[in-house]
Amino acid sequence: MKSIIRKSLILLAGLLCIAGIFLFTGNRVYADDAVIESAYAKLYVNDLAGFTADSATVDPATNNVTNVSAYGRFGYNDSYQNVEITSILNFSTIGNTTFILRAQGDSLGTAGGGWTNSGYYIRWYPHGQFDFCKNGAVLQGAFLGSLPGSMATDTDYTVVFKTVNKSDGSVQITFTINGYVILDYNDSNSPLLEGGWYAVCSEGSVFSARGYGFDSPVLNLADVGDPILSANFSATLDGDNVVTSGANSGVGYALYTDDSYTYKTTVTASANVSASSAFSFTIGANKTNVTEINRPNVVDPLWGWSETGYVLRWYANGQRHLGRAGNDSMVYVWDFPTYSAGDSFDIEYGITNFDDGSVRIHLKIDGNFALIYFDRPREGYTPLSLVEAGGQPSSILNYALVLTHSMDGQITNDEKTELQTLTLTSTDLGAPISGGAGIFDKNGSVSNFGGGIVGAYPNVPENSSIKMKANFTATAGNLVFTLASQGTLDTPWGAGWTRRGYQIYYYANGQTILYKNGEHICEGWAIGGYSISPNTDYTLEVGSVNIDGAIRVYAKIDDIYIINYLDYDDALVGGGTMSIYSGGFAGKLDMAFGKPEVYVESTQIDTNDEITLGYTLDGQSDGDSVQYFIDNATSTAQAEIDGSTLRALSAGTIDVYVCVNGVYSDNLTLTAEEGEYSYIANLPTSPLLVGDSFTFEGALSSGEIVDSISYSVEAITGNATIDDNGTLTATRAGTVRVYVTINGLKSEGYLISITTKVEVANATAMAVGEVRKLSYWTPENSLPDEEITESYEIIDGEQYITFNPLTSEITANSIGVFTLRVTITGESFSAVSAIVSIPIEAPIVTLQGVEDMYVGQTLELYPKINDGVDITSKNIVIVSGEDILDIDEESIVFDNDQPIKVTALKSGTVRIKAVINGIESKEFDVVVSPLQATIIVNNNMIAGSTQNLSVMFNFQSDELDQLAKNAVFTITSGQEYARIEGNTLIANDEVGSVTIQATVGDYSASATVNITSAVIVAGITNNQEVVLDSKIRISFLFPEESEVESVELVILEGKSRVKVERLPLEEDELASDQQFLISALDSGRVRFKLVVNGISSEVFEFNIYENTSTLYLYVLLIAFSLLVVILLTVFITTIILSKKKNKKLAKEASEDKQ
Amino acid sequence: MTKIKRCYYLILMAVLCLSFALFPCSSNGATLQGLNIARRDKQITYDFLDENEMPILGYVGIPNANAGDAGNPAQNPSFINRSNFQRYKDAGFNILSGLYERATLYDPDVHKALTLAEDLGLAYFVNDTLFKCESYAGAVESPSEESYSETLKNAWYLDYDAFAGLAVKDEPSAQDFDGMAKVNKVLKEQTDGKILYTNLFPSYVETYRLYLDQTPIDPWDAYVQYVYEFLNKVQPDVIAYDYYVFMNIDSTLENPLASSNPVDIVAGEVNLQEYIKSLSLFRKISLDYNIPYWVTVASYNHRHGELFTAKQTAWTVNTSLAYGAKGIQYYTYWPSIDGTTMESWQVPSRAGIVSANGTPHDTYYQVKKINENIKIVDEILMNSTSKGVIQFGKQTLPLVAEDTLYGYGLLGNVTGGDAFVGCFDYNGKDVYYIVNNSVNAGRSTFKADFLTNVSNVKLYNLDIAQYNEEHGIDQDFLEYNDISSVGFNLSGGDAILLEVTR
């Protein structure tokens, strides 16, 4: 999450930068570009003499050109060697477009490859690429940037082309479009120093162009006549002209109150001019509270001038000088035309304040910049632009010249400048961690390094910088820094270097050069004209900042940008090796800007206790790289550090030190003493799952007996409960911290991670055509209160579906099975995945809500197809019985949840089915019955009793229920046996039958009520079928208020077929509880009645029948009985015969004895 | 002579023994010897369900990936996921049995199924190959009781709240009972309220499948003996069986004893008489030993590949409940695997309550409605004792005399259509579970007449509960006081419950 925020901020910053670049039009000045200008210190803008169009239309009033079809010349002047031209192009047809500069000769010809004229040109191709040519040939090795994107129509392109003849004889050519640096090239190989044509040529493009900066200033003293110029020094005033005759004479002054001010005048060198004669101008003299223009308030721009303010001088020998209050000489420039007596020049000088506190001073001579200086806030210096309102006097000092002047009190648009500040967010890397030729000491310093690698930072991330104090002993050589190098410890050999990366060269003469991949792409100078002096402290800084699609590489000296280059062309945005190389530039590099000290509240600590380390830092430090260390070489105790938290692990001394921005402190010694502590002896090895439990075991370091132990848990992003036994049960994903307290000693907190299970929530089968948005399921309340991201991955079966990962929507296309995985992640817990396979099948149509109906009833039927299937047609089809059912067409809505209403028209059976998208459901039979009313009444009632009557329809609805309540009951027959009062039937004492009729709206019903004896027989219904050998238990009811005196069960018919038993009464039973048991002995009809107190009950009749199994048993029993009888008969007969035989034998024996 | 006398004594003893052997048989006609079945003080209370909740189970359960034969597995993805379990629960089921996923040592599918069941409040029978019992039928001796005991102690799934017990062999033969007896013994010893779950064969199965040795006795007697042998040996706390009464398409309520189509039925008859005899058999066991019985009804005709009508399914469920069943099972919830591709599972087409991919069929919504009706009345039925059944109107069901009542309590008559009434004692109150006994009938207005005014009648069913809910009444019944008759509407196969205070 943090990463996302960080990236977003970087992206936003990048967008702001790009937006800022696009805002740059006309003469807007970037602070960074301004730095480069100040570094060159010799940039000139030539007011070209109007526009000449060869095959285009030019508006003479505006110099705007339209319908360019071949080329157009923006003018020429051979003497104008250094120009900055701004034009705005707007294409109606896109084609190759070429910008020519310094073309020689009157005829430009074409800018193609056959072009033989001398000159430079840049060809802009529609797809956004550029060629840079010199004398008709592509100049290999020249670096060309690129625009983001192709050439577009109806778009303003602000093109700035700038050439500078440099003092070393080379030509610097700069070309930008909409602020993007396309070319920044130094031509030192037979450079084309002369001026010439500037032209914009079309090779197929059609565009209009507007020019900026082509109007020549008209300097007419009479036109101005500004009264605030006063020749009240030694000069004399002739009309608006000031005439001086002597040296060192002030000629006048003016007040200005705006942040920006430009003064234009014309000066003529007097006859007695000498080599040391100079025009001098002061500006920004900080004379406050000036309310009146008079001599005492004017500051003389004399050498040695002690007032605040800037002074500009132009000497006759061509030297120009910018000084600041206190004789602070800042810039000398020599190589500009000299002047001699009688020479006359247009002079312009001005001041521009910027929002960051910078101030720009410029001097123009004949429209060309003679000097530009950006005075930036830095330590010890405050730019003199910070003035109070009320005005600052400016004076002109004349050294033997005749001055004519013109006043321009307006701030022109051309000069209106705007500063845009670029925030560089490089991280200071501190001291290198790999040594080379030099060895960085603990304080981040290296001394006496010779040639070769001084140090290196392998694997540095993006947006890194290094900053150091440098003090060189040598007066020659260079110090080279490589950035974003793709090799380790690369040797940054100039143009021969073949590694990818940037190199920044600091030369002893103050020059800096930026190379990319061995190609020279940008050059700068230290504060205009300065060299790097030996034995002088400088602050050097190099670094890079990634911007979306580009990289800004920069170099600073004393916090002033010397190189500040935005590389859009195949920018090397990655990190890599950053190394420092010395090209014979011996000296000392010191990464230290102050030496920190470790700070702790107490140097005494118990083992296993924690203490927070801090640091104090004297001197300069703007980095944020802080790291604490334990000096294990000198410590006697064991300890560990987590960030700024030190934990003593054993007794002894602990030496700690801190490194801040690569600078190390001295050791601070802590004393650790053994202390008793509690701790948790076991920790889970993997995150716990919500719902899982884990039992922690607390222990004492001393191993002593534990008197009391308790556990606690602290919810962080997750949550859990813990019981007295240390059993933690995870209840929410995230992290918690667990503590044990033993004998009052609370342990450190142990961070426990909890995760949760996740499943695809709607993993049921899909139907072809169904669109389903996937969702996930986790146990209730198991997620922490943080942003949860879910993602689905198709593992298998992609061919059956279409999956939109952005919406998590699956569209089922064909029958098959696909497998997917869901992953959820939060900031504080790990993702847990589950895999599930989901089959796709043909859609099924069902019809719900079908039930039997009654005529007039309306039923809501729900034809349904699989959820998610787009319903294109839907209906209920009557297969048979069309005239029975009416389908309400208006109720058909193509939605699964909307029913179709059907109404039963008449009775019968109708067969229906649902059809959705042409797919049929199964068929259903619906039985439609006539709507009938039924009287709810007990058809049997006891004489003399009453009962309520009500009517019920065989279909219930609120309307019918209400109708039933209004039923009117009448007796249609048997009025002598009962009467009706309201809805109560009151029986007389006589036994008989009553027919009741109910009238309910259009319906009627009748019922017959038998008024029976007061004796009610229970346990049997009339005309019942009774199985042979079964038993019927008969009880009876008699009015409760009547005492039962006698009760008899009388068999009227079939007495032989049954056996009647009077069951004995239990102790607490009364005569009214008497029951009879009728056993069915033989098949046939039986009739009986019960007589209580002489009152007969209804006569009951039942039929006894036998079933085959019972018959079988009887047959078996009879057979068995016969068998037993036979056997017994045989047995007894045998015994009798035996006894007789024995008697006979005994008698015979007796007779024998006898 | 002595020899002759002894001979007579021997003959007499033989005759007596024969008679004793014949007479103790139940009305179901089987010969049973040496029964040692303890009567439970009370019926089991499952620790995995609410005390008053009736078990409702869908068999076949939700398949894991590549389910079926390990040697030739089906090519299917895993369906064990939250959505399918949620759908199962939404249909009113509260117990699920593992089938293809087996918990030998450890199995991630079983773990996931237990976890999902636990999350959703479902109970789950673990199918563990170590307790399968099926491989021991025949010659191979089952593991020892000690071995089972040790295995169960180390079982990893015991601590899951959803663990309801062990699903051992489905439709076991009598030879499997020894192994099951050991498993059930150690299960009872080591757990409380967990059960051994198996589903017994229906009575119409071939006799050789009941007894591998093809005991040559009457099929029905063989079945009764098979059931009692299960009771005697395994000592179960729950007994479950199936009987797919409408599977024989020739058998109708109008022609209940129609012969089976010989092509379809290879063993005993599938007809209403045996359907009732089976209910009667298990009702008797339930009353004799206080053991609840669960009835499995068919959700589709797997012999003919046709879905039953909603009325047929409702009638089967409700007649079972009227007879005193204390649990309902459906076969099948998920189509059983038939081949290696999911397409082949669809044979016969559209089998099961859901499709091979888990998509609901029409049956799903029908079963859901039936189950919702059960939930309206299950608290009463689970706490009631069956007293018998009564038929009013056409006497279409060949009832067993032992179960048949001609009156119960003050209920005098039910008119308006053919009614099948289960009579119960509910803590001193009379409860009547009244089923519209005409399977194909449309809705009729029924009327229950009492012999005299009763002080309070509560009328329960799903329509009433929904009607009440629509009218903002927070109760599942309509209540009447001091009334002599009550009217209600019923479609074929549907049922209402009357709770009567005299």
Image: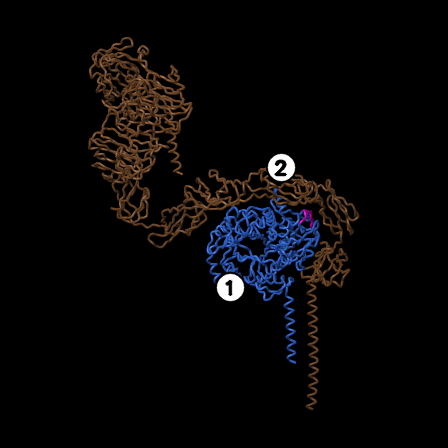
Chain colours: A brown, B blue
Please give the residue where the numbered disc 2 appears in the rendered image: A891
The magenta stretch spans residue B441: yes
Name above or below for residue A811 compared with residue B429: above
> In the shown orientation, is residue B355 left or right of residue A684?
right
SS category of the residue bearing label 2 = helix
Residue B390 appears in the picture as rendered = no
Q: Secondary structure at mark 1?
A: loop
> Residue A1142, can we see it?
yes
Q: Which mark is residue A633?
A: none
**Which sits in the foreground, B182 or B36?**
B182
* Residue A412 position in % (x across, y down): 35, 18
B499 up-or-down from A1086: above or below: above
Q: Position of residue B86 (x, y in %)?
A: 53, 47
Chain identity of mark 1: B
Residue A8, position in %: x, y? 39, 34
Depicted B355 relative to depicted A197: above or below? below
Q: Image check: B502 left or right of A755?
A: right
Crowding near pointer 2: few (<14 within 10 Å), some, many (20+)?
A: some
Q: Amino acid at mark 2?
A: Ser
**Residue holding disc 1:** B140
Q: Single out the residue that lies furthest toward the bottom.
A: A1154
Q: Is residue A1031 magenta?
A: no
How many marks the image carries: the answer is 2
Instruction: Tell me which segment is drawn in magenta.
Output: B440-448
- Give the residue at the far right of this rendering: A976
Depth-wise, is mark 1 or mark 2 nearer the camera?
Answer: 1
Q: Amino acid at mark 1?
A: Val
Q: Quadrant of the N terminus of chain B?
A: bottom right
The quadrant holding residue A655 is top left
Q: Residue furthest front?
A: A114
Q: Give whichever of A36, A1123 is nearer the camera.
A: A36
